[in-house]
Amino acid sequence: MAYPTELWALTGLWVGAILTVAIYSYMLYKENPLYRLAEHVYIGIAFAIVAVVAVQNTNRIAVTPLLNGEIVFIIPLLLGLGMYTVFIEKYRWVSRYSIATLVGVMLAVVTSGILIPNIINQVASTITPPMGSTMMDWVNFFYIGFGTICSVSYFLFTREHTGILAPTARLGRLVLMVGLGVMFGNTVLFRMAMLAGRIEYLLQVVGILPL
């Protein structure tokens, strides 16, 4: 890709580069007006995008079907409008019904979404023998099964961790620490990848690397 020559393309490149430097100036120096400006610009743009997407989704999911004769969609519209009565003290009680409905629906969706992939599928994967026939497949199978049992025993609070529970709970704690360490390592690597991407972008803007 050739380096752009159009005014708007060049402006976009350099604005992105300046905002990148401004954001990372907090880490390299300290909080400063340039960082606060970039932070406010980011938050403002993010809020504008969320607002536009929300309006478009409401229009596509509820308003358009309602105008096409599907009267049932007036219910979510009324519940959504009811939330704004929280700013009117006299009619604030109306918002409780909207908020309670939203919380109940979201709780049901989240519960069903967590129950199947994180519990049922996890249990099924743990007790299902591996499809492969290599030694490493069976090592992973027994490690995951044994580690799961030990980790669960660590959270067994109805009985003191003595006897057979003492070594399993201790091993479960070690397995949990390894898992948390891996998650932390993945998070650090993801942040480093983001930093590397921003550095590459800056080098492309100044012409050291090709676009």
Image (cartoon, helix red, strand yellow):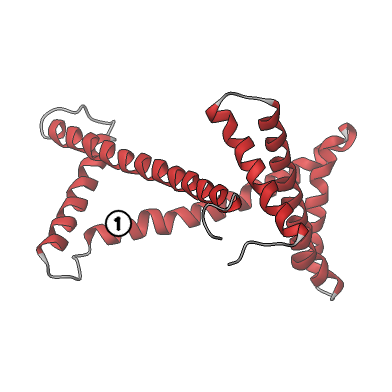
Instruction: Give the percent coordinates (x, y) of residue 12.
Output: 71, 53
Residue positioned 35% across, 60% down in the render: 121
At mark 1, the secondary structure is helix
Q: Name the side, left or right, on which 31 lies relative to 96.
A: left
Residue type at numbered disc 1: Val
Image label count: 1
Q: Which residue is drawn at 57% across and 35% down?
A: 24
Tell me where residue 156 appears, x and y as whole percent: 27, 35
| Residue 41 in picture, x, y percent from top left | 73, 40
x 37%, y 45%: residue: 186
Q: Which residue is at the front of the view, 178 or 60?
A: 178
Q: For residue 109, what is the image quadrant?
A: bottom right
Q: In this view, does 98 lie to the left or right of 111?
A: right
Camera-side residue of 64 and 88: 64
The furthest residue to the bottom: 68
Q: Identify which residue, 33 or 191, lies in the foreground.
A: 33
Residue at position x 53%, y 52% from top? 208
Q: Mark 1 points at which residue?
A: 123
Quadrant the N terminus occupies: bottom right
Classed neighbour count for the residue bearing mark 1: other residues with Cα under 10 Å, few (<14), some (14–19), many (≥20)? some
Location of residue 147 with respect to 134 vertically, above or below: above
Q: In the picture, which quadrant includes the C terminus?
A: bottom right
